[in-house]
Amino acid sequence: MDSGSKFLTFTSIIMLALILQVVLAVADQRDNPEKAAVEFAEAYFWLDPGMAERLCKDLAGEPENSAVKNYLQRIDQEARSLGYEFNYMKQGLFHIDAKTTLKDANTAEVTLKGERRRTINPVFGLVARWFGMGETHPVEETLDLVREGDGWRVCGQPFRLIES
């Protein structure tokens, strides 16, 4: 009898853990300003063209002449002028601290603080972080976000995306 109650207890704990995982996974799917700002910042420093998905319509523009395309071209030119390939300019964002201030139901301001480090590929970034190699640079930026359609989008002048 004793082993039967242990099995029942163990099974109950496993079932409770699975239910909790499902609830947390569903809760994580909700879009919020902080999540949008962090996703944009990570894509921005990783030089991922997918950052355009987190930009508001005013900034995203037309794909052939968008702010993201122009920014990536500037970074490519900068890399080549320094004698590097484009991938050398990629940076990972670590230790991100985000604070959200809602202005109203459809606008918010998110202040991001963190560190960025040169990350040519994900393995290099991980090893550099483990062994404390490479320079880290502080990141502090306040991003303006608006709710557009089904989610939050970054507006204003995020980082160096738009330069004259």
Image (cartoon, rainbow, N blue to C red):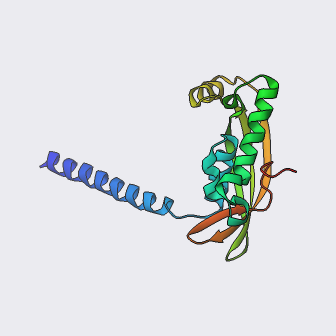
Q: Nearer the viewer, residue 36 or 11?
A: 36
Q: Is residue 23 left or right of residue 51?
A: left
Taking the spot 67% from the left edge, 59% from the top edge, the residue there is 62
Taking the spot 72% from the left edge, 68% from the top edge, the residue there is 108
x and y percent of residue 82 in the render? Answer: 81, 25
Taking the spot 64% from the left edge, 51% from the top edge, the residue there is 51
Q: Is residue 133 left or right of residue 11?
A: right
Q: Seen from this angle, which residue lies furthest front?
A: 64
Taking the spot 79% from the left edge, 40% from the top edge, the residue there is 138
Q: Nearer the viewer, residue 90 or 28?
A: 90
x and y percent of residue 17 in the render? Answer: 35, 53
Q: Nearer the viewer, residue 143 or 49?
A: 49
x and y percent of residue 31 in the render? Answer: 56, 64
Q: Seen from this angle, which residue lies furthest right?
A: 164
Q: Seen from this angle, which residue lies furthest left?
A: 1
Say which quarter of the image contains residue 23. Answer: bottom left
